[in-house]
Amino acid sequence: QRVESAMVRYARSANFTDLNAYELVLRAANAKVEKTALIESLGLIEQAIKLDPNSAGAHAQLANSYLLLWRHSLTDDPDEMLRRARSAATRAIAIDNNSYLSHQVLSLIYLYADKDHTQALASISKALQINPNEADLMVRMGTLLGFMNRDAEAIEWIGKAKLQNPLHPVWYEWNAGFVYAAAGENERAIIASKKALEVYKTSASIRRVLIAAHGQLGQWTEAKRYALEIIEGNPRFTLSTHMRNSPFQDPAEREHIWNIFRQAGLPD
């Protein structure tokens, strides 16, 4: 029943006129944050757009898939992926300015690509105004506030999201782990991040949260182990390349986390 209600809510918000298109986008929206899965999701969304070219939700999901490829360094042409994400998000807004999905993905672009926290906050606030009961948006708000060093508010939003959706997907834990680590709630960060890592087993992003949390606790054996796993997974990993879109608003907070990464063994 929970899944069915979520599907109905998504379909309504995305304004699909073609049920087959909706089903394709729903499948794409559940893709893991992995290169192969995201490329497959793009194919599904492109099929959906052919069936229903005026679905804001389809274009918003297209933008999100391109943005994930860019954010997580899963493409050989990051500039093109970001350009496509912006284009699809602009199209989604043009189709329906009252689509919360469109404003959500626009907020992510403002945050991760532009590091424009003011605009990111305006967009996610607009999305929540349109759909105030959507738990996914609450997580996004919490994550944004975590990057803005507004830790108490960030934790509150994560808590709201989990109450709103008790059977939440594991990516909530991924985001919660970051928020807790940024707030210095390191034990909570480790618990949440390990839950996420059970599903996203190859994720360097989750491992970075674990490095930050263990480092802040002075647990350098664990921090160095996760750093080594990141390098083993990607021998070309560097902070300057793969952390280019980490949008801490406070430079001092960013430098604090970067110093932990360096001490754990991640190269500049």
Image: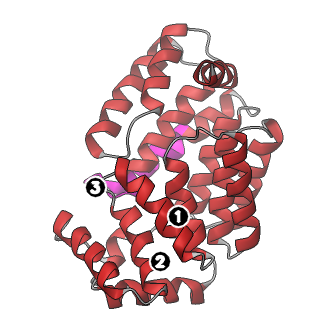
Regarding mark 3 in the picture, which secondary structure is present there? Answer: loop
Range covered by the magenta-colored residues? 70-88
Which quarter of the figure is the C terminus placed in? bottom left
Residue 258 pos. (x, y %): 43, 85
Q: What residue type is disc 1 on?
A: Gly
Q: Is residue 101 magenta?
A: no
Element assignment for label 1: helix
Task: Say which residue appears at 53% left-offset and 83% top-offset.
Answer: 254
**Circle 2 SS class:** helix
* Left or right, residue 117 beside residue 132: left
Secondary structure character of the magenta stretch overall: helix
Decide whether residue 80 is among the magenta residues.
yes
The residue tagged 2 is 213
Q: Quadrant of residue 226?
A: bottom left
Residue of label 1? 177
Tell me what residue is drawn at x 58 percent, y 85 percent.
Answer: 253
Q: Nearer the viewer, residue 21 or 90?
A: 21
